[in-house]
Image (cartoon, rainbow, N blue to C red):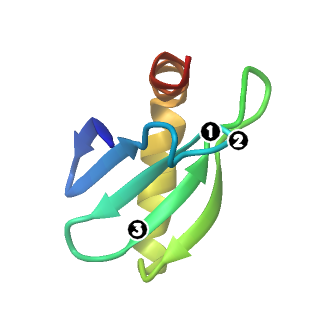
Amino acid sequence: MVRVHDEAGFRVYVYAPPREHQPPHVHVECIGGGEVVVRLGGEKTMPTLWLNHHMGAADAREALRIVQAYQRRFLEEWRRIHG
């Protein structure tokens, strides 16, 4: 697992093979509790919330906003880690 970003109480990770799988996505942990998995989308599609593991709605929205803001960078990290 590679931490690729920290912001406002959130940590964003890309998990490495062989554990990880398609489609490109990141795991976002909230220091206050919970984790969401966000699909990164692509050149013409926005990131979307995929799974929510016990994160409150407001924190999940903020996690998605963070991923949307850094989508390109996170996609580059995903591709770098997954080849």
Q: Where in the figure is residue 33, as x and y percent of width and height?
A: 27, 77
Marks 2 and 1: CB-CB under 8 Å?
Answer: yes
Q: Which one is closest to the eye, mark 2 or mark 3?
A: 2
Amino acid type, residue under disc 2 in the picture: Pro
Q: Is mark 2 on a helix, strand or loop?
A: loop
What's the CA distance linking mark 2 and mark 1?
Answer: 8 Å
Q: Where in the figure is residue 15, as x and y percent of width and height?
A: 42, 43
First in sequence: mark 2 vs mark 1 = 2
Work out whether 25 lies above or below 80: below
Q: Mark 3 points at which residue?
A: 35
Q: What element carries label 1?
A: loop
Amino acid type, residue under disc 3 in the picture: Glu
What's the CA distance linking mark 2 and mark 3?
Answer: 18 Å
Q: Based on the displayed image, in which of its 4 quarters is residue 54 positioned? A: bottom left
Q: In the displayed structure, does residue 44 sit left or right of residue 20?
A: right
Q: Where in the figure is residue 66, as x and y percent of width and height?
A: 42, 44
Q: Where in the figure is residue 17, as x and y percent of width and height?
A: 49, 37
Q: Which of 36 and 63 is in front in this view?
A: 36
Q: Based on the displayed image, in which of its 4 quarters is residue 5 positioned? A: top left
Question: Residue 23 bears which disc, if any?
Answer: 2
Could you tell me which quadrant the N terminus lies in?
A: top left
Work out whether 35 lies above or below 69: below
Q: Which of 17 and 42 is in front in this view?
A: 17
Q: Name the residue under label 1.
A: 40
Q: How crowded is mark 1: few (under 14 residues within 10 Å), some or many (20 or more)?
A: many
Q: In the displayed structure, does residue 32 sit left or right of residue 72?
A: left
